[in-house]
Amino acid sequence: MHVETIFHVLLDCSFSRSCWAFSAVKQPVAGVEIEFGSWFFDLFDGCREDVVAEVAMVVKSVKHVLGQWKITKFESPNALYATGDISNSNCWRKPDTFTVKVNVNGATFEAHQKFGFDCVARNNHGKLLEAISESRWGCVPPEIAEVIGIKEALSWIKRKGWGKVVV
């Protein structure tokens, strides 16, 4: 019903206002035009330095991934996916014809005593075939979460009956 601007989605719609009210975060005054970035970083005034540093690190990471997405989307339309640094080792490359490519990622959530993994299968055109994701109870190092993800990916590949696969 409204134009989906950042301001509307995060601040102005009735659902967002309810969420912000519940969070007890100081909201901007209704009807007053604000610059979103300034408002967002003003939220962290008075926070511990480690919290502010962590937020800044997340924002930096998001900007980097957005930049990579823009490169693949607009500057190099034939490169379907890129993550991390701009280098050949971190760019998604399509597999040979009639080959499925499976990417696996593991993650840990120490505060919740959980870990998880996800697996994405794409064809040689970069089209998503299928994806799986799972979380489990336990505290494991990130490397173990990823190894468990690889193990589950191999079982998934076998169940799907995919013959030629690159992991």
Image: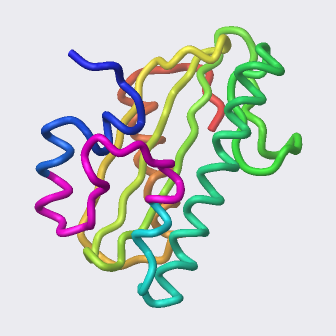
Q: Is residue 48 left or right of residue 25?
A: right
Q: Is residue 90 left or right of residue 145?
A: right
Q: Which residues are magenta?
A: 19-39
Q: Position of residue 30 (x, y in %)?
A: 25, 46
The one nearer the camera, 7 or 97, is 7
Q: Residue at x 36, y 70 (%)?
A: 109
**Rendering quarter of residue 4:** top left
Q: Is residue 10 left or right of residue 5?
A: left
Q: Residue at x 44, y 59 (%)?
A: 39
Q: Is residue 87 left or right of residue 56?
A: right
Image quadrant containing the N terminus: top left
Q: Is residue 117 above or below residue 72?
A: below
Q: Position of residue 58 (x, y in %)?
A: 55, 63
The one nearer the camera, 12 or 127, is 12
Q: Residue at x 65, y 59 (%)?
A: 60
Q: Is residue 4 above or below residue 45?
A: above
The verdict on residue 67 being magenta is no
Instruction: Indicate the colouring scheme.
Output: rainbow
The one nearer the camera, 140 or 35, is 35
Q: Is residue 22 above or below residue 1?
A: below
The verdict on residue 24 being magenta is yes
From this viewpoint, which residue is outermost toward the front? 32
Q: Position of residue 22 (x, y in %)?
A: 11, 62
Q: Position of residue 163 (x, y in %)?
A: 55, 19
Image quadrant containing the C terminus: top right
Q: How many marks can you see?
A: 0
